[in-house]
Amino acid sequence: MPSNAVEFQTTERYYLDPELGAIVNIAMTMEKPLLITGEAGTGKTQLAFEISRSLGMEIEVLRCKSTIKGEEACYVQDTVLRLNDARFGGGESGRQVHEFYDYVIWGPIGRAFRSEKRVVLLIDEIDKTESDVQDNLLDVLEDCQFTIREVNDTIRAIERPVIILTSMRRCYCHYIAFPAPDEMRKIVQLHYADVDKGLLDAALAIAATRSPRRPASCSIGWAPCSTSGRPPIV
């Protein structure tokens, strides 16, 4: 377990229900990846940013795409630059063609593992990647190490990061349910403290009759219309 264990207790602009707070702190204490699933707009991705902000940790973000490869999430070698330096020289850059690491560009996972301070590592929408990439990434995150095949070096995490994934398996998992009316009221009031009570009550009544295909909770965008102040930047 980490010697510098800390506890996440939410922020002034993120509603954290007790169950979610408990699983976040369990995952942090056990140094295990935490999978967050749930409907669009329920705060899955934002959770990682709020943990980072609340605990004063840097955050590294991997935005997953269908074309991403596990290796590039850790590092890539700039072969074009290396070839260019081999032909024309590195000039005043200080790069040496025979030095492999002079041409390594670290990905979000590589940067998180090499950081001397504990950071938050967000793997966003991992289910967009191919299944074999998901398996490779989860192996890397589970072991907190990866191998640079070109030179057969192993990069191990100096400090195990706080790892938050949106979607997938093989880690602690918590589903963020669509907010109940009383929770939605707290969420709206976090962002728009001066919202008109009558409008809020009416909006919550409409939300209670929503269809099974629920809108993202970003639908609270109507709230600034009823306040005198400018909406917060989130």
Image (spheres, helix red, strand yellow):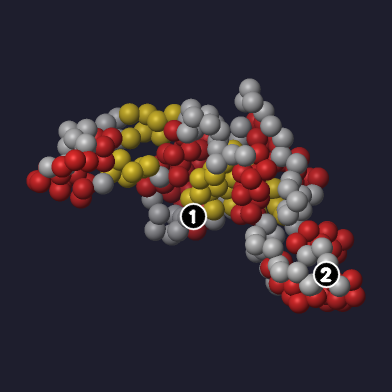
Asked whether, in this view, residue 68 is left or right of residue 13, the answer is left
Hey, what amino acid is under mark 2?
Answer: Val
Q: CA distance from mark 1 to mark 2?
A: 34 Å
User: Which residue corresponds to mark 1?
Assistant: 63
Hey, what amino acid is under mark 1?
Answer: Arg
Q: Secondary structure at mark 1?
A: strand
Horizontal and vertical percent for residue 6? 69, 32
User: Can I make out residue 139 in this image?
Assistant: no
Closer to us: 150 or 78? 78
In primary-sequence order, the first of circles 1 and 2 is 1
The correct choice, above or below, for 102 with respect to 192 in the image is above
The correct choice, above or below, for 45 with respect to 195 in the image is above
Residue at image x 65%, y 30%? Answer: 30
Q: Residue furthest top?
A: 3
Q: Secondary structure at mark 2?
A: loop
User: Can I make out residue 42 in this image?
Assistant: yes
Task: Indicate the quadrant where residue 190 lies.
Answer: bottom right
